[in-house]
Amino acid sequence: MTSFKFLRYPGGKQRLLNYIIPHLPASDSITNNYIEPFVGGGAVFFAINPVRAILSDINHELIMLYRGIKYAPRKVWKQYSSFPSTKEGYYTIRDEFTCNRLISRAARILYLNRTCFKGMWRHNSKGEFNIGYGGQDRRWVINEKDLVEVSKRLKKVELLCADFEKVINSSAAGDFIFLDPPYKPHEKECVNEHFTYGRFTFQDHIRLSRVLQSATSRGVKWAMTTSSHKDILSLFEGNQVIKIPIGTGSKPGILTKDSGEVLIRNYEKV
Ligand SMILES: C[S@@+](CC[C@H](N)C(=O)[O-])C[C@H]1O[C@@H](n2cnc3c(N)ncnc32)[C@H](O)[C@@H]1O
């Protein structure tokens, strides 16, 4: 495994790291906390490797997974490895396996993530994970050592399950916030069934622009990937906009040249 790709995550920034990281501060220049309020698979967090961080997401199961790996990576691995390797077994773990222990929950989520169809993450109206089986090909791409490494990286990380507004409002001078909200390239809002919490409306972008404006006035530095739609850009006027030359465009999984994605930041130079 390279670059801590232990999770498959819709909208993950793994493949765009080369275009994003040069525009962000290096770990040793972040004087206080590195904060990610929409952490998802955490591609940017793992690439920057900050000394102290706050990682948050509204996806509760995702945060349970991070917590399980942080506290007991070897136990999570042991249970993950013991789960079945068949399609029928997948549906048994998905639909019938219930356990409230943090380790078991984390192992189950990791197993579903690595063996479900295309790493999608969606729940039905009852809150049950409902993605079909995808195969075992990506299950053994990760190993116990990888989870131990992830756990080490999470040692100085506070993990929260919260709406972005609360997390951003708690930031202070010296913090750096990286934001990757759900968005659809070129579009004004995102109603995307690949995410658990994929409904991110224009009202949410307005809410986001307000809390970021207030963070700026407190001396917080931030950078955000988002859609290049003119209505989104107009919410962040006065900040620097950098085009991301390639992206997932309108077809998830396929990189395209007309990305429709930008990086917006409230500082001139790193
Ligand atoms: C584009 S993904 C982040 C992907 C991540 N950067 C990566 O590389 O894997 C957006 C994330 O925002 C989360 N999210 C959606 N609405 C949210 C909200 N109101 N507050 C906090 N997180 C939210 C979703 O659960 C999802 O994990």
Image (tube, rainbow, N blue to C red):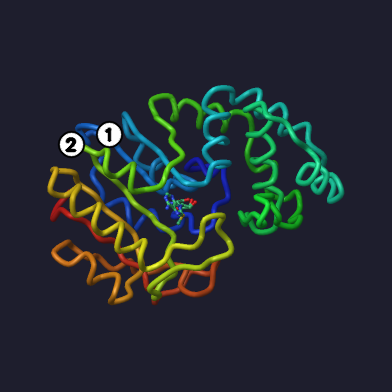
Mark 2 crowdedness (10 Å alpha carbons): few <14, some 14-19, many ≥20:
some
Residue 113: % across, % down: 65, 47
Mark 1 sits on what residue?
33
In the foreground, 25 or 191: 191
Q: Could you give the CA–CA distance between mark 1 and mark 2, rounded to whole angstroms? A: 7 Å
92 displayed left or right of 188: right
Residue reaching furthest front? 126
In this picture, residue 46 sits left or right of residue 238: right
Q: Image point 30% across, 58% down: which residue?
A: 207
State which quarter of the image contains the N terminus: top right
Assess whether mark 2 and mark 1 are in contact (beta carbons under 8 angstroms).
yes
What secondary structure is marked by label 1? Answer: loop
Q: Is mark 2 on a helix, strand or loop?
A: loop
The answer to whether 176 is drawn above or below residue 146 in the figure is below
**Could you say where residue 29 lies in the image, as x and y percent from the top left?**
20, 36
Q: Which amino acid does label 1 sit on?
A: Asn
Q: Where is residue 91 in the image (x, y as percent from the top left)?
A: 81, 48
Q: Mark 1 or mark 2: which comes first in sequence?
A: 1
| Kind of residue sitting beneath label 2 | Gly
> Image point 78% across, 46% down: which residue?
95
Residue at mark 2: C-beta within 8 A of ligand 1 = no
Q: In this view, does 17 lie above or below 241?
A: above
In this view, 247 is above or below 219: below
> Horizontal placement of 234 versus 6: left or right?
left
Left or right of residue 22, residue 258 in this image: right
Task: Estimate the x, y position of residue 236 in percent, counting from the top left.
Answer: 21, 64
Q: How crowded is mark 1: few (under 14 residues within 10 Å), some or many (20 or more)?
A: many
Q: Name the residue under label 2.
A: 174
Q: Tell me which corner region of the image, top left, top right, bottom left or bottom right, holds residue 224.
A: bottom left
